[in-house]
Image (tube, rainbow, N blue to C red):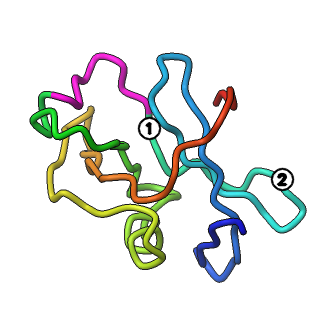
């Protein structure tokens, strides 16, 4: 059964994928499986592992600004992620470091 999230009055399916550097991407799809948004950002030069102290859990960087304002709360409400309250500055904004609470994808599904 797919994970579903309500964002901007849209019912969206959550799809996990991987960026080229193997970090996890969270994509949101419309009911017809077309892309609606990407909830994560990939900052290859940011050592997430150092920020979260090598806990053995899977973490993602959530883009909760611009067109994605509110996505952090929507994903957390549905049990997709848990906000660690850690933020990483990037340019003029910050991204949220969040623990991924759902199973990782099997096989290659690159972003």
Residue that badge 2 annotates: 34
Q: Main secondary structure of the magenta part?
A: loop
Residue pictured at 83% horizontal, 53% vertical? 34
* Label placed on residue 27: none
Residue 94 image offset from top left, x and y in percent = 24, 45
Classify residue 86 as left or right of residue 14.
left
Q: Nearer the viewer, residue 32 or 54?
A: 54
- Under circle 1, the secondary element is loop
Residue range in magenta is 42-49
Labelled pair 1, 2 in contact (Cβ < 8 Å): no
**Of the residues under marks 1 and 2, which one precedes in the sequence?**
2
The span from disc 1 to disc 2 (Cα, nearest Å) is 19 Å
Q: Is residue 106 above or below residue 8?
A: above
Give the position of the N terminus as an image quadrant: bottom right
Residue 17, image x, y percentages: 61, 38
State yes or no: residue 97 in magenta.
Answer: no
Outermost residue to the right: 32
Q: Disc 1 designates what residue?
A: 41
């Amino acid at each position: 059964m797919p994970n579903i999230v309500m964002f901007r009055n849209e019912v969206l399916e959550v799809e996990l994928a991987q960026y080229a550097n193997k970090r996890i991407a969270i994509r949101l799809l419309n009911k017809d499986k077309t892309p609606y948004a990407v909830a994560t950002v990939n900052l290859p030069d940011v050592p997430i592992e150092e920020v979260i102290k090598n806990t053995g859990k899977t973490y993602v960087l959530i883009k909760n600004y611009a067109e994605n304002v509110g996505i952090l709360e929507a994903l957390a409400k549905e049990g997709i992620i848990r906000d660690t309250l850690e933020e990483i500055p990037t340019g003029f904004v910050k991204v949220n470091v969040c623990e991924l609470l759902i199973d990782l994808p099997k096989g290659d599904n690159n972003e």
